[in-house]
Amino acid sequence: MANRYLHNVQGLFDTIAPNYDRMNNIISLGTHRHWRAQTMTKIHLQPDAHALDLCCGTGDWTIAVAQILSDRGEVIGFDFSAPMLKIAQQKVDQAQLHDRVWLRRGNAMHLPFKDNTFDLVTIGFGLRNLPDKPRALAEIFRVLKPGAQLVCLETSQPDQPLIKPVWQWYFTKVVPFFGRLFAHQYQEYSYLQETTRHFASYQQLVTLFEQAGFDQVHYQRFNFGAAAAHFGTKPTTVIAHD
């Protein structure tokens, strides 16, 4: 069932890839760039660090991480959609970062990397689309070095009484309409708004991080809670449980 779900979601992202960046700008009114920029201010890496950007899509966050590294560091952008990765590669080439960015296609719930490999893992607007989120977080935990950090940027749900109904109206009515108007993809953007509405709350995501073994879990919310960045650190000493 999970494989079929993932295959269907992959097909959806393959379809929307040509319009993905433009639609993100339209749907978020451009604020997704601000969310990522604010999140990046919380990330501190050595110039020679090794990072992994999961569900990298068209590569914007992959490139942002690469830009704070030297040519001795590297970022792997990892995604299951070949059309998304094709666009990402074009951006990497344009930014002249091919000496520190590598793009790979694969399944975020079965990472082809050794334990304790990365100094940072980022995942932006991708966790909500994975059918087994605890499995994905367990894989991220496995490939992070002890003391390294996971940073997850996701859409979220406002909980203020005056804001919440406006947010629900926007995502249930306006987002699919924008998908039809600007990309002729009503069904695809209807699905995406559903994943946003039904994704874990920011409090529930803290619990998922902690259950995966992360310490120092905290978050920053944006736009009255429309998005949130979550941070978690892999302990330097991992206690084995029977």
Image (cartoon, grey):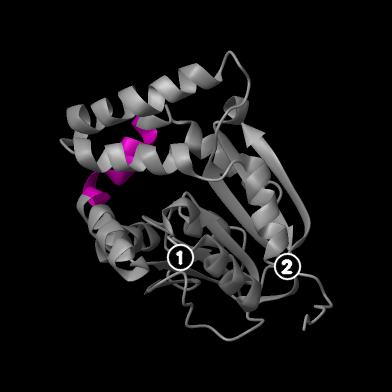
User: Observer-nearest residue: 47 or 228?
Assistant: 228
Residue 47 located left or right of residue 130: right
132 relative to 12, above or below: below
Q: Residue 179: percent from the left, percent from the top?
A: 24, 33
| Residue in view at x 49 percent, y 59 percent | 62
Residue 117 placement, left or right of 25: right
For this orientation, the residue located farthest to the bottom is 114
Looking at the picture, which amino acid does disc 2 mark?
Gly
Q: Magenta part mainly helix, strand or loop?
A: helix
- The residue under the point 60% across, 30% down is 225
Q: Which labelled disc corresponds to residue 110?
A: none
Spot occupied by residue 202 in the image (x, y as percentages of width and height): 63, 41
Q: Which mark is residue 213?
A: 2
Numbered range of the magenta stretch: 16-26
Helix, strand or loop for disc 1? loop
At 26% from the left edge and 51% from the top edge, which residue is drawn? 17
- Among the 4 quarters of the image, the one containing residue 74: bottom right
